[in-house]
Image (cartoon, rainbow, N blue to C red):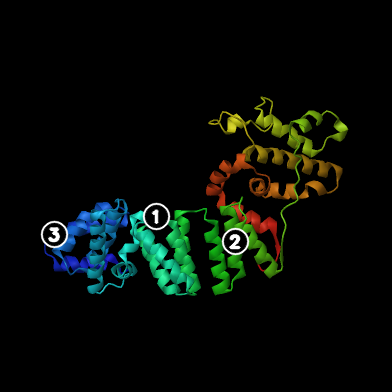
Amino acid sequence: MRRWVVALGLCILATPAFTQEGEAIKAESLYQSGNRLGALPYYEALTKANPNELLYAERLTVCLYTQSAGMQDGPARRELLDKIQAEAKTAVSLGSQETASLVIANFDLSLASKEKGETLAQAIWLSGEPYYGKKDFKEALNRYATAAELEPKAPEPAYFAGDAAQMLGDLPAAESWYEKALRLAPHGAKVYVHWGDAIMKIAHDPNGARAKYIDAIVADPYGTRGRQRLAEWAEAQGAVLAPPQIKPPNGGMEMFKTMGHDPSTRTPWTTYVLDEFAYQTNAKASPIGTFHKDYPSEAKARRSLLGETKALHATALEAASNAEKQGKPADEFRDLIEVDKAGMLECWVIFHWSDQNMEQDYRQFSTEHWKILHDYIDRFEIHGGVR
């Protein structure tokens, strides 16, 4: 899109009324902030006063759509859809090269039937699918891009636009669309996977692709999409995927009852079991704190990211201390100690020792520590291959 400031400046030079200048600035401010309904009356007035101003016609087309999106089907909505198309045709007649204006001006409005539960944007988005299916990726992209312009908070049209741009071999455009989709839905694993595919297919960059496949795992650690694509990448690149060998006992209450009483059978895993149990039962003497202290808003204790990480950290410290005292490697605990020293135990817990109780912890942790999760996989789970 042309820089609106240039177009606005030309309009102001041609319009001596200072009130129109103020209205134009206010309208554009509202539009750019996403308040298109607020901008609508300004652009209606501006287009009436300046019928040959291209920018106003383009803006009014989109603002009118926003008004129509919440309307029930009926004569008023159909009349408004006709008005939207008429405004788009006006923009095209004035020389508009905007994708949205060009698509809407020639779109079959009967496809935007509320009986199908579709807004105009949804109908345009879905109309891109047949073009994509017959490999007319340019027209498919035009449809997806128009839907994304009309619904700037919807991630799916942007994601589809990225795929179409990828099929056209336009990596910068594909990346721009994928970035937009991820700003709207940061945990879109499929978007990261397709972004990695685009980098591999167009740029032939295995390192860049690997980074996106890792992000797909971080985006959805409990799904299979990212893991599967990273495994395919590893096979093609001669790399090996293998997580750290950390094997905590998982015996629950029965194990707690039998551990720690016989010093001859005590191991660092005894510390893990005892500390985890003390943490979850909120024991006052717990050496790693308590669940209620770490999660004061929750009445019922559960397995948690902090509790598991603290118990594993205590285990790693004890195993390292024992190895130093005994003067021999802590083979069984080597990976645990390494991950702990790297400050990445939370990552291992999330990816390999989690359950439904911890999914809520993951969301907050990933928002604040995405890079740590990414770097953990890159450092501890991918061995060999292109670097």
Q: Position of residue 60 (x, y in %)?
A: 24, 61
Identify the mark nearer the N-term, 2 or 3: 3
The quadrant where residue 138 appears? bottom left
Residue at numbered disc 1: 153
Residue found 54% across the figure and 44% down from its top: 364
Crowdedness near tag 1: few (<14), some (14–19) or many (≥20) residues, C-alpha within 10 Å: some
Q: Quadrant of the C terminus?
A: bottom right
- Left or right placement of residue 233 versus residue 123 in this view: right
Residue at numbered disc 2: 213
User: Mark 1 touching mark 3, by CB under 8 A?
Assistant: no
The quadrant where residue 190 appears? bottom right
Vertical comparison of 195 with 66: above or below: below
* 285 or 260, nearer to the observer: 260
Q: Is residue 228 visible?
A: yes
Q: Quadrant of the N terminus?
A: bottom left
What's the distance in space between the residues labelled 2 and 3, CA to CA?
54 Å
- Left or right placement of residue 30 versus residue 147 in this view: left
User: Mark 2 touching mark 1, by CB under 8 A?
Assistant: no
Residue found 66% across the figure and 31% down from its top: 280
- Left or right placement of residue 47 versus residue 381 in this view: left
SS class of the residue under badge 1?
loop
Residue found 18% across the figure and 67% down from its top: 11
Outermost residue on the top side: it is 284
Identify the mark nearer the N-term, 2 or 1: 1
SS class of the residue under badge 2?
helix
* 369 or 122, nearer to the observer: 122
Identify the mark nearer the N-term, 1 or 3: 3
Mark 2 or 3: the one toward you? 2
